[in-house]
Structure formats: structure tokens, C-alpha cells
Amino acid sequence: MPEARGKDDADGVQIDLISGQRMDEMATMEKIRMILDGVHDGKIVILEEGLTPDEESRLIEVTMTEISPDEFNGIEIETYPKSSANNSSLLGRLMGNSESNAKLTVIGPADQIETLHKDETLISALVSRN
Amino acid sequence: MGLFTELKDSISRVTERLFSEQEPKRIGIYGPPNAGKTTLANRIARDWTGDAVGAESHVPHETRRARRKENVEIERDGKTVTIDIVDTPGVTTKVDYEEFTDEMSKDDAIRRSREATEGVAEAMHWLREDVDGVIYVLDSAEDPITQVNTMLIGIIESRDLPVLIFANKIDLEESSVKRIEDAFPQHETIPLSAKEGDNMDEVYDSIAEYFG
Ligand SMILES: Nc1nc2c(ncn2[C@@H]2O[C@H](COP(=O)(O)OP(=O)(O)OP(=O)(O)O)[C@@H](O)[C@H]2O)c(=O)[nH]1
Ligand SMILES: [Mg+2]
């Protein structure tokens, strides 16, 4: 089990990988709740299948209602097309089992995610502890 | 003619009259904070109605409530196109009040960020329910490929809303319209400077064509 540590501990980030199958079973608001609960806990949430545009729009809306000074600044969200991810990047290899060309989406706390895309090897190290 | 047919006839005449006076289309002005949405909305409103829509500022999140200007009549080639313009708060996925503390007191910065978050939520809501078309404004001196822009354009496309991309701030030296055209080749991009009033003829032509 990876340990969830405080925000200022750069190498103690926990990552939740959510499969497309699991997402398929959830209603829109359940997905959004799951994502934001994870992010509130300082986790980085990776969605194998991404979100629909409508879900993204609701995610932005709900995120806004939860922003609170000194506590939660919102989210950073990055989407990688599966096809290109599959070839090169680490995220693609992580999720390499999927044949679909849906997008891969990474969501994290705004004040933490910088670390995420600056250093892919960090994710690799973290995920291998899973 | 039987009574029923007559009745049907008169009902259809009434409904025809009701719907022929088409409601003006509501055009939402969307885009990231500071792109120049309010400057554009003000210019359109001033050019065709004489008054302004809202305050402009170099500090992001100046607009924190969607603001509507109704019945803006734009004349093109002898024809009049009537639209409502809705200036919306710049969309983002994060707001940190500490970004404003250089410009104002901590209390004001916290208030600004609270209002900004409410405004963005409201803007998203308008996009799902209340607009018939979108003008997506980008600062052409900035990189257009951001998560927010890609997401927003995707959301707009998924709702099948007609959209025009406005490459604003072409008066700036670092401006690149091509960068925007390359980022969103599926949509028409119109270059302009809302502040200087450059290329407004093409702006109004395209508004009339797309949303008329
Ligand atoms: N150089 C230049 N500056 C512009 C132009 N249009 C707007 N600006 C400036 O950009 C800044 C932001 O303009 P606003 O119209 O307030 O931007 P906005 O998109 O409404 O911003 P929010 O309401 O905060 O989302 C202001 O300082 C404007 O004067 C332009 O065409 N050229
Ligand atoms: Mg504004």
C-alpha cells in the first residue's frame, strides 16, 4: 500500500487508478464525488477512460463550489490521448491493457500536480509501490 | 370546413405568429480569464447600443457574474441581426486568492476568489442550459493549448453549439493568430483587437453570418 502523506512531502503522493470498467458502473455525480474526494485527500486520480464533455463541465462546476481559501485551490486536469500515450509515455504503459483509443485523464490538487507532469519518473516510482 | 379543422387552422396561425418573431439568440462570450471578453462585449454593446456591459481589468476574474446585454441589433448589408450577448466570467479549474494579494488586501483577495468560483460555476451552468451560440475569446499572445481551452471547446462541441474563435489582442507583438488556427482547425478563427477596435468589420460580418 502506498502511504498518503502531507502535501509538502513531494514523494509521498498517492495515486488512484480507476479502470474504465469501474467508471462505467457509476453515475456522473458518483464519478465526480469519487474524483473530488480523492483530490481533497491530496491524491492524484487517473481515469483510464476519461470523462465525457458533460461530466467535465459538471466537474468544473462542482470543483468551483468546493474551493476554499487556504484549504482547497481547485484541480489541475490533464488529458492524454490513449494512442500517443500507448506508444511512448509511462501513463500509456501503466494502462497498456486497454485496446480502446479513449483518452486518459489525470486529475490532482492544483497545488500539487505541477510535480506530476514535471517528473514522470516520480509517478513510475510511486506506482510501482502499489 | 369542419369546426375542428377551422380550430386547427386558427391555432396554427397563432403559433406561427408567436414563433415568427424569433427570440434573439443568446450568444455566450466564453474563454479563459483575462482574454478580453468584457472588452469585446463592451465594444459590441457600445458600437450598437451605446452603453457598456461591465468592468475590464488586467487582474483576472474581473467578471464574476454572467452579464447579459439584450437586443443588440447588428446591421450588416442592410439586414439586422438581433442577439443577446452574455459576458461570462473566465473559466478555470483553480482559483488561488494569493494570486491577487499583490493587487489588493487579503480580505478583498479572498472575496474576489469566492466570487470568481461562484461566477465560473454559473458560467458552466449557462453553457449547459442557456446559450444558443458561443464566441470563444483567446489572448493570441498566449499559448492556446491549455487544458481549460481544450475542455471548453470539447464541451461546446458536444452541445452542438455554433462557435467562433476570436483571436484577440492582435495589437500585441507576441500575438500569433496561426497558433490558434492550428490548435483548433475545426473552427473559424477571427483575428481582432477588442481594445484597439481592429478588424471589427470582419467580427460583425462573422457574428451576423454565424448567429443571425
Ligand atoms: N493589448 C490588448 N489588451 C487587451 C485587448 N482586449 C483586452 N485587453 C486587456 O486585457 C485585460 C483583460 O481584459 P478584460 O476584458 O477584463 O478580460 P476578461 O476576459 O473579461 O477577463 P475576466 O473577466 O477576468 O475573465 C485588460 O487589461 C484589457 O485592457 C486587446 O485587444 N489588446
Ligand atoms: Mg470580464
Image (cartoon, coloured by chain):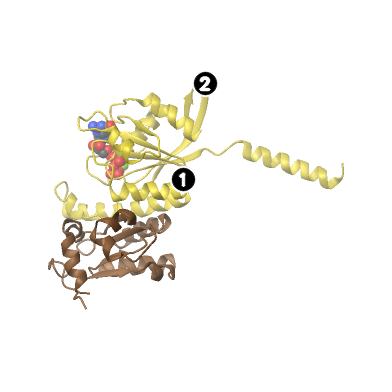
Chain colours: A brown, B yellow
Mark 2 nearby-residue class (10 Å; few <14, some 14–19, many ≥20): few
Secondary structure state at the residue bearing disc 1:
loop
Q: Chain of mark 2?
A: B
Q: Position of residue A75 (x, y in %)?
A: 27, 59
Q: Quadrant of residue B5?
A: top right
Q: Position of residue B155 (x, y in %)?
A: 41, 50
Q: Quadrant of residue B181?
A: top left
- Please tell me in which quarter of the rendered image ligand 1 is found: top left
> Which of the two residues, B66 or B96, is positioned nearer the viewer here?
B96
Q: Which of marks 1 and 2 precedes in the sequence? A: 2
Q: Quadrant of the N terminus of chain B?
A: top right
In this view of the protein, can residue A38 be seen by the observer?
A: yes
Residue A20 drawn above or below residue A3: above
Q: Which mark is residue B68?
A: none
Q: Secondary structure at mark 2?
A: loop
According to the picture, the residue beneath numbered tag 2 turns out to be B78
Mark 1 sits on what residue?
A: B131
